[in-house]
Image (tube, rainbow, N blue to C red):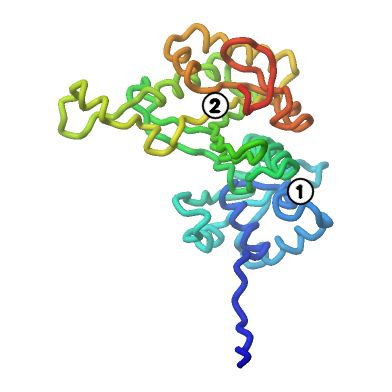
Amino acid sequence: MTRPAVIQPGTADTYAHQALALIAQHRLLTSTQLHQMLMPHTPPRKIHKVLAPLRAEGLIAHTALGVRSGLKAHFLTAAGAQVAADWPELRGRAATVIASPTAASMRAAHTLAGVRAHLAFLTEARERGDEYQPLDWMPEVTHRLPDTGGQDRLTADAVLHYTATQPRRLQYRAFVEIDRTTMSSERLARKLITYARFHDYTPQPAGRRGTAADQNAALSAWQRFYPRFPRILFILTGAPRATLTARITDLRRMAADHGLVTRLASHVPLGAAILEDLEEAGPSGPVWTPLAGTGERRGWTHL
């Protein structure tokens, strides 16, 4: 007896669903960046057919990036945030609603520089057959901190989750800091101290006196979120190469001179690269300067 064919619903999300999820997670994306993430092997005009209905429904809006460039960056509206709020791929990540095109344009430079770095990892992962998807870059990840002179939170510009498949399967995680030279070099380097404090922080169990046995039994704060402390990657842009190189030297000096950071560097790979080098050679190219030990440049997984 032949059983009647059963028509099953599809398991793949539509491009419109994926585009809305990406805009929700990454805050701002240009049409070109969305095309690279979603459908890199199709004509660029196809992404506009995906975005047009989302715009017509009031789920996304856009801001112009300069008069001459013609580029637009898309962001989520309040209605779009409400639609995407309960999606599994965004669970635990509250969508950021940007109030206006003007507000979007004011945060575009930093946000889109981060997306450029993400696309460098994504492009290489596709070439290598590694597992790294458009949602594996999580912007603005925050962790609470102990005594940090009034700064009670660590906010990484992004955390990436990457699985290499060759020559053997290895999982990598990284905190990413995007530096556009908008802050002093000293302030940039001080971020290493914040990461070092997070690495060393072990919360005392509530209601306990903090005996040595209690402290040994307690998990470090970071172990509540990561099986291994993520490597720390600084990605620099927005200034002449000599300026960026000097800032990398300052990061290396902090790792050598500050005891807390030196201890962090003995356990956690630390590196810095120039964004344009990253885009040209790929993250596995010799573009990363280790912040401890020899300054010989290498790929990000060999820091």
* Alpha carbon distance from label 1 to label 2: 28 Å
Residue 32's mark?
1
> Which tag, 1 or 2, sits closer to the chain's start?
1
**Quick one: label 2, few (<14), some, or many (20+) residues within 10 Å?**
many
What residue is pinned by disc 2?
232
Q: Is residue 273 left or right of residue 83?
A: right
Q: Inspect the image, locate mark 2, and give the three-letter code of the amino acid beneath it.
A: Ile
**Mark 1 or 2, which is nearer the eye?**
2
Q: Inspect the image, locate mark 1, and give the three-letter code of the amino acid beneath it.
A: Thr
Question: Could you say where residue 28 lies in the image, as x and y percent from the top left?
Answer: 63, 46
Question: Could you say where residue 217 lies in the image, as x and y percent from the top left?
Answer: 25, 29
Q: In this rendered view, identify the residue nearer to me: 48 or 273.
A: 273
Q: In this rendered view, identify the residue nearer to me: 90 or 68.
A: 90
Q: Is residue 234 left or right of residue 95?
A: right
At x 41%, y 35%, the residue is 143
Q: In this rendered view, identify the residue nearer to me: 122 or 171.
A: 171
Q: Is residue 73 left or right of residue 26?
A: right
Residue 190's mark?
none
Question: Could you say where residue 173 lies in the image, as x and y percent from the top left?
Answer: 54, 35
Q: Which quadrant of the structure image shows residue 79?
A: bottom right
What secondary structure is found at the residue carrying circle 2? strand
At x 71%, y 23%, the residue is 287
Q: In this rendered view, identify the residue nearer to me: 234 or 130.
A: 130
